[in-house]
Image (cartoon, rainbow, N blue to C red):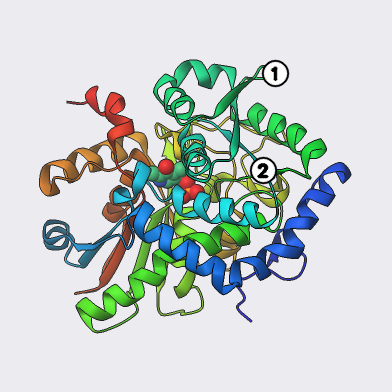
Amino acid sequence: MSQYKTNEEGFYGDFGGAFVPEMLYPNVKELRNNWQELVEEPAFQKEFQKLLRDYVGRPTPLYYSKNLSARYGAKILLKREDLNHTGAHKINNTIGQILLAKRLGKKRIIAETGAGQQGVATATVCALMGMECVVHMGELDIARQAPNVARMKMMGAKVLPAKSGSRTLKDATNEAIRDWIPNRKDTHYIIGSVVGPHPYPSMVAYFQAVISEEIKWQLQRDFGREHPDTVLACVGGGSNAAGAFYHFLDDEKVRLVMAEAAGKGLDTDETAATGHLGRAGVLHGSLSLVMQDEQGQIIEPWSISAGLDYPGIGPMHAHLLKSGRATSYAVTDNEAIEAALDLAKTEGIIPALESAHALAALNQMAFRKDELLVLNLSGRGDKDMEAYMRFL
Ligand SMILES: *Cc1c(COP(=O)(O)O)cnc(C)c1O
């Protein structure tokens, strides 16, 4: 049994579990009792793999970057999740969850979204499957993220404004939970990262594991070995990192590295580097590292990248850090921007701001000669052009 899988109660070491209000317990229990058996059925696997291939566009290439390799003195490979349909890894998980929802007999999908990426990934698979889709989104975020709201609407989703509190992601999450409790019979809640109550972290990691599954055979094909020396990925909630690490978790020879958003700096109030600054606490139904003040109030995080602007981190990642299995580097907004501009100029690839944090972390790392490093390029930068334009 891998020490990086959960126990029965959903704990990775000290972190995880299902800390939910009693009214939500039946919803979580239904998933917990059924998900693993359902996804392991050959018919499920067949449909999942076929959609990943024909709809998402997998396998994504593992691209050897000559320029980055020459600069850092290591063999640097980019896992091109940016080439997926909708432009990032999130769709691997939404495809998996909607197939699961269908097999659980659900007719309606809900999701919550901050900047809109998860809302778009969910609206996409609902359109594909002809399922009703409701996306809860903070009223303030709706105003700030007009293009993503338009995308969701164009694909037939209903976007419901969360009008309480700060009218952002946290409030949208509360609304989604409020929606789910009375509607369990016909509704599945798609969570977009390896966060939330058990079994979500394990389930999302399982769907994203296709990333490292491909890395293994691509390395074998191109370099004659299945294992890289290092895997590097950015971490918001942690799903793209979980997918890139998954099949290497128990191979201690493989170094696992996370890049987190330091925002304006670790010593400022405007940061989102939970692995560095967080303390144990419960957020969104699981016990993990959380950015909180002395009273346990959640600290509003900051990152220039919407996908990393989250006050927590998945329980698997908290465990990986605590056990010393993984290390984390904190990357500032400016460092990420610089790395993105550099990749665009030297490789002709415009990365998502999130992924640019992983690129910038290379500057803080030391390498053995000819070290084989896979960097998970989680998404493309089209959505971030407004931010990049200020630096051109
Ligand atoms: C959402 C997002 C992330 C952060 O989410 P994880 O769950 O940590 O992977 C990273 N990169 C991109 C492109 C995203 O859209």
Residue 44 versus residue 238 in the image, above or below: below
The residue sitting at 74% across, 61% down in the picture is: 32
- Residue at far right of view: 22
Residue 346 located left or right of residue 127:
left
Q: Which residue is mark 1?
A: 164
The residue sitting at 35% across, 46% down in the picture is: 85
Residue 303 located left or right of residue 181:
left
Residue 150 located left or right of residue 367:
right
User: Which tag, 1 or 2, sits closer to the chain's start?
Assistant: 2
Residue toward you, 298 or 364: 298
Mark 1 residue's CB less than 8 Å from ligand 1: no
Q: In which quadrant is the N terminus drawn? A: bottom right
Q: Position of residue 121 (x, y in %)?
A: 47, 41
Q: Position of residue 62 (x, y in %)?
A: 25, 64
The residue sitting at 51% across, 78% down in the picture is: 250
What amino acid type is highlighted by mark number 2? Lys
What amino acid type is highlighted by mark number 1? Ser
Q: Which residue is mark 2?
A: 107
